[in-house]
Image: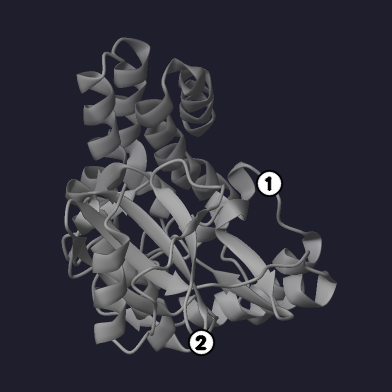
Amino acid sequence: MPDWSSIARHLSEVGVSVSANAVPIPVGGGDISAAWRLKGNDRDIFLKTGRVASLPMFTGEAEGLAEIANAKAIRIPEVYAVGEAADAAFLALEWLSFETPDTDVARSFGERLANMHRNTASRYGWHRDNTIGLTPQENPWSDDWITFFQEHRIGYQLQLAADNGFGGELQQQGRRLLKRLPSYFDGYSPAASLLHGDLWSGNWASSGGEPVIFDPAVYYGDRESDIAMTRLFGGFSREFYDAYEAAWPMQSGWRERQDLYQLYHVLNHLNLFGSGYQGRALALMSALL
């Protein structure tokens, strides 16, 4: 159990007043770290806690949220503090109450996501590595998107899969795909857009009548990869896609590249959760090849 009084002291140092005797209430929804609701003297706080080894993951999340906040395009929960308290790491965020999103919120989300994607860098990657789920995500700055995606997305996940015992056809098809990868970008050179990086339906919500995103795996890359992730497991409305398309239309070839970008996340799920995702990874590779 984390040392709550130590966390309370950390929060007080950044201007968030919490009683040293306050005891957080556990909340559901987290499968990577423990999640809690802590009642402060003037606000409620959402806490994530984990082992001390979780601190780099929490720091990467906090910096990713700050990067998105700086874009001033879409709401994120405010970051109060991230650090180490006794024998635990923690991340303290603004507590937000969620409601079922209506069509207006979905449209707003599409527009705001397109605006976020218009925030670009001169290169692909980010100033630090972070995580995608529990998997390390390498983000070295690169001048070439194809090389970045070959080495630090698909290639990296394939190596992890080999290390996890997934060889044979998966690796054979993976090698073929990596060789062919430049062909999917003929005539297309994506901007290095600010990406959420893990935009499935569980990482956005409606709060106070506006969209909010959280749990990012931020880096700068092809905006199509965020859209591909929204389509991987579903949960996004037609109004969302129509609004995004109206704000910034997708470019020719995006449907084929969608399979490529979804493959990254399916391989990551294979490495995190096991062989149940191998068939889907092979199906995506087969469609691409």
Work out whether 34 lies above or below 244: above
Name the kind of residue labelled 1 in the image: Gly
- Element on which disc 1 rests: loop
Mark 2 surroundings within 10 Å by alpha-carbon count, few (fewer than 14), some (14 through 19), many (20 or more): few
> Residue 234 shows which numbered tag?
1
Q: Nearer the viewer, residue 178 or 81?
A: 81
- Element on which disc 2 rests: loop
Give the x, y percent position of residue 226: 50, 59
Residue found at x 34% / y 37%: 180
Residue corresponding to mark 2: 42
The part of the image, by quadrant, that contains residue 271 is: top left
Work out whether 142 lies above or below 158: below
Name the kind of residue labelled 2 in the image: Asp
Q: Nearer the viewer, residue 167 or 204?
A: 204
Give the x, y percent position of residue 197: 42, 58
Give the x, y percent position of residue 138: 21, 52
Residue found at x 47% / y 26%: 281
Residue found at x 17% / y 66%: 141
Work out whether 79 lies above or below 86: below
Does residue 214 appear left or right of residue 11 in this picture?
right
Instruction: Answer whether residue 187 is visible to the viewer in this image.
Output: no
CA–CA distance between discs 1 and 2? Answer: 37 Å
Residue found at x 74% / y 70%: 106
Q: Nearer the viewer, residue 271 or 228?
A: 271
Instruction: Answer whether residue 106 is visible to the viewer in this image.
Output: yes
Mark 1 surroundings within 10 Å by alpha-carbon count, few (fewer than 14), some (14 through 19), many (20 or more): few
Outermost residue on the right side: it is 103
Give the x, y percent position of residue 222: 41, 63
The mark that comes first in sequence, 1 or 2, is 2
Does residue 179 appear left or right of residue 185 in this picture?
left
